[in-house]
Image (cartoon, coloured by chain):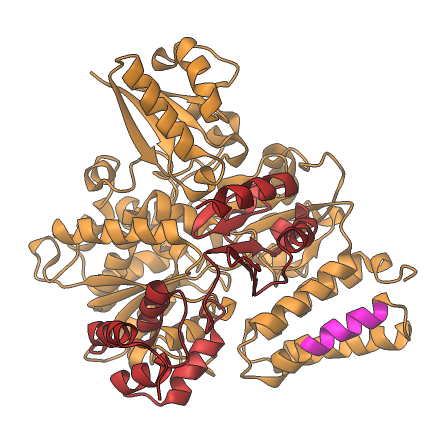
Chain colours: A red, B orange
Amino acid sequence: MSSLDSAVREKILGLVADWKDEPGALLPVLHAVQHALGYVPPDAVPLIAHGLNLSRAEVHGVVSFYHYFRETPPGRHTIHLCRAESCQAMNSRALEAHAKTALGVEFHQTTADGAFTLEPVYCLGNCACSPAVMIDGELYGRVSSERFDELVADWGKR
Amino acid sequence: MPVTIYVPRDSGALSLGAEAVARAIADRARTDHADVRIVRTGSRGLYWLEPLVEVDVNGTRMAYGPVTAADVPALFAAGLLRGGHHDLSLGPTEQIPWLESQQRLTFARVGIVDPADLDDYLAHGGYKGLARALTMSSEAIVQEVTDSGLRGRGGAAFPTGIKWKTVLDAPADQKYVTCNADEGDSGTFADRMLMEGDPFVLIEGMTIAALAVGATQGFIYLRVEYPHAHAALTAAIAAARKRGYLGRSIRHTGKAFDLEVRLGAGAYICGEETSMLESLEGKRGEIRPRPPLPAVKGLFGKPTIVNNVVSLASVPIVLDKGAAFYRDFGMGRSRGTLPIQLAGNVKRGGLIERAFGLTMRELLDEYGGGTASGRPTRAVQVGGPLGAYVPPADFDTPIDYEAFAAAGAMLGHGGFVVFDDTVDMAAMARFAFEFCAIESCGKCTPCRIGSTRGVEIVDRIRAGRDRDAQLVLLEDLCDTMVDGSLCGLGGMAPYPVRSALKHFREDFLRAP
């Protein structure tokens, strides 16, 4: 039995219907579902598989392959912290340690109050302004530990 | 007549507060009852001066930067609208030496035009390449691109014209043009800047590519980490379609081409062309063994062009000004210009487009101006996370595909990441393996298992456990990965490791 409530179920079926006739529809559908719900619930997999005429294993295989898709709900805001070389050259390893301590989480975890999920990312394309952080799609450059704390305080109110 | 003020909307500039600056300027102008028109552009690429504000003074753009919202009242008081002097004044933008010495062909309009305005694109020479291509046969277009000497700017540097010729010669009822905009190499941001700052040039390049091979559908596979580029591309495609530059009959010629953006989902491997095709088909982004080449059997099994953003965006100028014009830039077999991305621990980081042949030393000294920390430069990683670490002794290497290969490095996408002397190169070597382990598609054993074993070996070396034997084992592992991997991820991860071992061995041999 699916644990999805009927509104969510309808939502997912609608998104599948939007895309099902397009070639290579699975990624766009998963993006649409994650955009709408914040994650791809495991119970959505059979619905998507049926709608796109794929096996459940194929859909699950795709969801689990890509770092961006998640199978659990994120916090209210997602912080993507860049771990790539350019940011490392500007001390992102220290920023990473600071972020984990300040939020009290490891990567892929959500803070106890549900406000923030911390995710690693490998390049945000802001390498001339390293280290870089993205919060809900908003990019920040030259992020020091102090700046990180300010951003968290600011976003925590949203 | 309103005074035109340019404020970037490039995400790098936004990351440093450009939105607040634009708002402060608009607010202040309203308070002063000043007639001001604010144009949101891409970035000129001088990131240490972002947000860079420009004011049009009798047709000359005067630059100020880096501007914060708090500087705006003082700038207005100093006569910003007339180009008045202020501590942040940089003079005429085009005369800033860092910019003046560049040779911008592909990036000619980035930072100058409003990326959402098709008329602005046309006013700055846009769509001239397409206009000429529409008068030519497919064979002639392919020949023009071949003659220009353009090679893929995504990293592999394969001649673009030859790739296109293969697609043109492959008989099929359907062909595709795909743009790999999954640029995930650390230190590279040219694709992002271009898509945000001049998306029409990419659309034009893809349209010319479609005419060259007889494709009617195109896809831009864009990384999900670039939401601003996504918005810019989506808007530009809609505008181009509305004005007949995309669609069933391009410019009323009866030739069809349409374009769609598809988002990746955070998998580095999808920067590899066959993985990208798998992902576009809605599957896991796993490598396809080659042959067959994508040019013969690509997207949905059809002949497909796969090119990088900068390669495709370089095509319009080749068609507009001719192959010889483009070919006359550069050295050896590296023709034209390379948009170089200077990043990491550097005082003046940004985008520098120059003809091939500039040396690394010129790049680092004249443009970069030393490290941001003020400490000595110890290493520069070139070509992304799978690129070699180049020591100062090799800084006289000219920026040229063959010269870099000869030096045991690779130019890749043209990203240069500077490290100062505080870097621990054994830690960076470990990270190269760690990154490969995280991002491996898992299809081939040398990459999937080798990367994890590599992390463990480096850890043992750093811990001083059985060091000599582990160093031998590490070399052996690197050989296996280079020779046995199906694609560049596993095949090149040993590059940063080996270069670190070769040039910075002392970091591996420190007391634990």
- Which quadrant of the view contains residue B501? bottom right
The answer to whether B107 appears left or right of B345 in the picture is: left
Is residue B458 within the magenta segment? yes
Quadrant where the N terminus of chain B lies?
top left
Residue A94 seen in render: yes
In reply to whether residue B509 is colored magenta, the answer given is no
Q: Position of residue B222 (x, y in %)?
A: 38, 61
Q: Quadrant of the C terminus of chain B?
A: bottom right
Question: Horizontal placement of B17 versus A142: left or right?
Answer: left
B98 lies above or below A20: above
Task: Give the residue displayed 62% in from the left and 82% down from the top.
Answer: B484
Tell me which segment is drawn in magenta: B452-461
Residue B497 vertical placement versus B450 (above, below): above
| Residue B286 placement (x, y as % from top left) | 47, 79
Where is residue B357 drawn, in percent x and y? 56, 45
Asked if B376 appears above or below B56 in the picture, the reply is below
- How many numbered marks, from 0 up? 0
